[in-house]
Image (cartoon, rainbow, N blue to C red):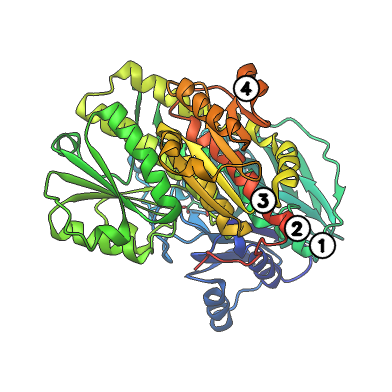
């Protein structure tokens, strides 16, 4: 996630770009930069931190010109720093990029072999080098861009300038968003509508594999391969606030719907399909070091702790190493038994959770190895840990964690494959099957998101309940906990999550005809048991909302309501089941008017 802006026309480019970037800050901002071309020279200004730092820099070292590009970065590859901030220049080519280039290491190696030197740690810099390489071959900016883009794998929205073709701006997209604004003798490019809404409401939405070349006051659209395209503009009548939320009512809903994209970014560039393995660039432990691990502690707080509980199931099932899960605030005060054969996995969205950081330090002091799972690049936990798996979910603005949680689950699944392959409990064939499961998730999530309308209706039926119970078993028990937490957090309804088998030891006494009970009952090895727990609830008059596998006639007959999710591997079910839990909590909170709309999480 990040924001890109481009401008070409008759006005000064910098103020337009900066205003656009400001409107895109919700997409993340750990550094920012602009490039403007003036008299055939590219002037670049970049700074670490918030946009105001770039403003200050530009006040002391202004740039002028009527064609330019800008970027607010949310790092995926390389820490937030001035050197890693975009734009990136190689030779005469200057690039801003939103996305992840999956084959950047391969390209970097090849380009280094050609004598090129890289200044940053980013994946983006390969784009500027490869275009420059092609430009040297062809002498034609547009052709160079076409040739270069066809060598990239992964996701990009890019704006590109060329010092040797100073009146031309090129933009292209694959997998990351991009919109073009049409003005009077001027054009705008942006990651998202709010950035340019004050200049024009006539917009062209770019599709994957498309490219636009702005030159001599004209915009020419084509595919990256070179076929001409007719693109029709659309009139956008959204208010600025609506535009920021992408037309969704709340950031939380926007982020729920972003989850297929978020998972794609978590796994991007990490899957080795042929080898049935994964490549985790941030995990520095060798196979030999991983093989020495005798015990794992996963330490986290809140929603991340629920992800940790799922991680325990995955790792124990596939790697046969004992895993303990601890709440960070408990771990640090309980004299845990750890040594240099222990691996700690610390999970924190922000990477700043104080108790989790303290637990990491405690573990390090006792000689444990560690790996962090974080969303925010270069956060304290990421910096202090020996290795990190970034979730690449993009900034999470909604108050309740959604995409950060399911990307943590995907990261744990990635780790399980890597660890199992290293210690030999997962062979190549099994690894391949597991990798193919990950590839399927985004499409399955798209299917689950289609249940939104149905879940809103369910929310209307149950919104007045005073209490809710959530039940699950095995790998889905943590998702019952997470469902209950979401509801409490945003709708202020009392909710408890329980392992379904624990019902008879107390909670069953609470069930009556006023108690909605959300039961996670997909077709898996626990199915019969959970289905019989469901019968117990029904016998006491409880109002069963069953989250079950698609087409489960038995459950349909018995439950008051069913939410049916696609049937897939048991390991993936927690990711799929999380989505109806999020939507149910969201809609109840909206109906009750309790959803805080504050921007809560960006530092
Ligand atoms: N992968 C690029 C980087 O880390 C772009 C990240 C973004 O989309 O902000 O610099």
User: What is the x, y in percent for residue 309?
Assistant: 37, 42
User: Which of label 4 and label 3 is nearer to you?
Assistant: 3
Q: Pointer 3: what residue? A: 465
Helix, strand or loop at label 1? It is loop
Quick check: can you spot residue 246? Answer: yes
For marks 1 and 4, the one nearer the N-term is 1
Q: Nearer the viewer, residue 33 or 1?
A: 1
Q: Which mark is residue 550?
A: 4
User: Which of label 3 and label 1 is nearer to you?
Assistant: 3
Quick check: can you spot residue 136? Answer: no
Q: Residue at x 13, y 37 (%)?
A: 292
Helix, strand or loop at label 2? It is helix
Answer few, some or many: residues within 10 Å of disc 4's Cα (few below 14, many 20 plus, some between 14 and 19).
some
Q: Pointer 1: what residue? A: 239
Q: CA distance from mark 4 to mark 2?
A: 35 Å
User: What is the x, y in percent for residue 88?
Assistant: 49, 56
Q: Pointer 2: what residue? A: 243
Q: Quadrant of residue 542?
A: top right
Indicate whether 399 appears above or below 219: below
Answer few, some or many: residues within 10 Å of disc 3's Cα (few below 14, many 20 plus, some between 14 and 19).
few
User: What is the x, y in percent for residue 581?
Assistant: 58, 42
Q: Residue at x 69, y 35 (%)?
A: 451
């Amino acid at each position: 996630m990040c924001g890109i802006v481009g401008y070409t026309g008759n006005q000064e480019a910098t103020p337009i770009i900066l205003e656009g970037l400001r409107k895109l800050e919700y997409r993340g901002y750990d550094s920012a930069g602009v490039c403007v071309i003036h008299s055939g020279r590219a002037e670049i200004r970049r700074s670490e931190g918030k946009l105001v730092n770039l403003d200050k820099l530009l006040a002391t070292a202004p740039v002028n010109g009527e064609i330019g590009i800008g970027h607010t970065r949310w790092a995926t590859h390389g820490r937030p720093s001035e050197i890693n901030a975009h734009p990136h220049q190689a030779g005469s080519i200057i690039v801003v990029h939103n996305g992840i280039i999956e084959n950047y290491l391969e390209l970097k190696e090849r380009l280094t072999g050609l004598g090129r030197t890289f200044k940053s740690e980013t994946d983006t810099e390969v784009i500027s080098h490869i275009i420059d390489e092609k430009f040297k071959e062809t002498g034609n900016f547009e052709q160079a861009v076409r040739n270069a883009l066809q060598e990239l794998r992964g996701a990009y929205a890019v704006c590109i300038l060329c010092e040797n073709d100073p009146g031309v701006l090129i933009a292209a997209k694959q997998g990351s968003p991009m919109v073009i604004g049409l003005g009077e003798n001027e054009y705008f490019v942006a990651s998202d509508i709010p950035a340019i809404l004050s200049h024009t409401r006539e917009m062209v939405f770019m599709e994957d594999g498309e490219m636009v070349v702005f030159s001599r006051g004209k915009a020419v659209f084509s595919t990256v391969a070179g076929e001409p395209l007719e693109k029709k503009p659309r009139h956008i009548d959204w208010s600025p606030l609506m535009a920021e939320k992408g037309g969704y009512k709340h950031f939380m809903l926007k982020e729920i719907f972003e989850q297929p994209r978020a998972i794609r970014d978590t796994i991007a560039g990490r899957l080795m399909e042929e080898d049935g393995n994964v490549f985790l660039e941030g995990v520095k432990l060798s196979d030999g070091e991983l093989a020495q691990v005798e015990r794992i502690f996963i330490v986290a707080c809140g929603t991340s702790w629920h992800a940790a509980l799922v991680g325990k199931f995955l790792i124990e099932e596939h790697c046969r190493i004992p895993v303990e899960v601890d709440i960070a605030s408990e771990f640090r005060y309980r004299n845990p038994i750890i040594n240099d054969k222990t691996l700690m996995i610390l999970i924190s969205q922000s990477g700043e959770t104080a108790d989790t950081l303290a637990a990491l330090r405690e573990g390090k002091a006792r000689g444990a190895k560690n790996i962090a799972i974080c969303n925010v690049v270069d956060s304290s936990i990421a910096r202090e840990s020996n290795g990190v798996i970034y979730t690449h979910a993009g900034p999470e603005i909604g108050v309740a964690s959604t995409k950060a949680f399911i990307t943590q689950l995907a990261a744990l699944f990635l780790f399980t494959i890597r660890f199992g392959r290293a210690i030999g409990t997962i062979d190549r064939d099994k690894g391949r099957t597991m990798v193919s499961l990950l590839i399927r998730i985004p499409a399955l999530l798209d299917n689950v998101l289609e249940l939104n309308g149905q879940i809103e209706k369910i929310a209307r039926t149950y919104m007045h309940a005073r209490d809710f119970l959530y039940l699950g078993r095995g790998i889905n028990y943590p998702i019952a906990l997470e469902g209950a937490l979401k509801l409490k957090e945003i709708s202020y309804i009392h909710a408890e999550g329980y392992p379904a088998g624990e019902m008879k030891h107390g909670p069953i006494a609470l069930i009556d005809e006023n108690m909605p009970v959300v039961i996670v009952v997909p077709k898996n090895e626990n199915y019969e048991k959970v289905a019989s727990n469901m019968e117990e609830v029904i016998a006491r008059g409880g109002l069963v909302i069953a989250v079950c596998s698609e087409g489960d006639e038995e459950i349909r007959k018995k439950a008051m309501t069913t939410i049916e999710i696609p049937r897939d591997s048991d390991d993936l079910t927690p990711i799929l089941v999380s989505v109806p839990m999020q939507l149910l909590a969201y809609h109840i909170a909206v109906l009750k008017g309790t959803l805080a709309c504050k921007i809560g999480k960006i530092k």
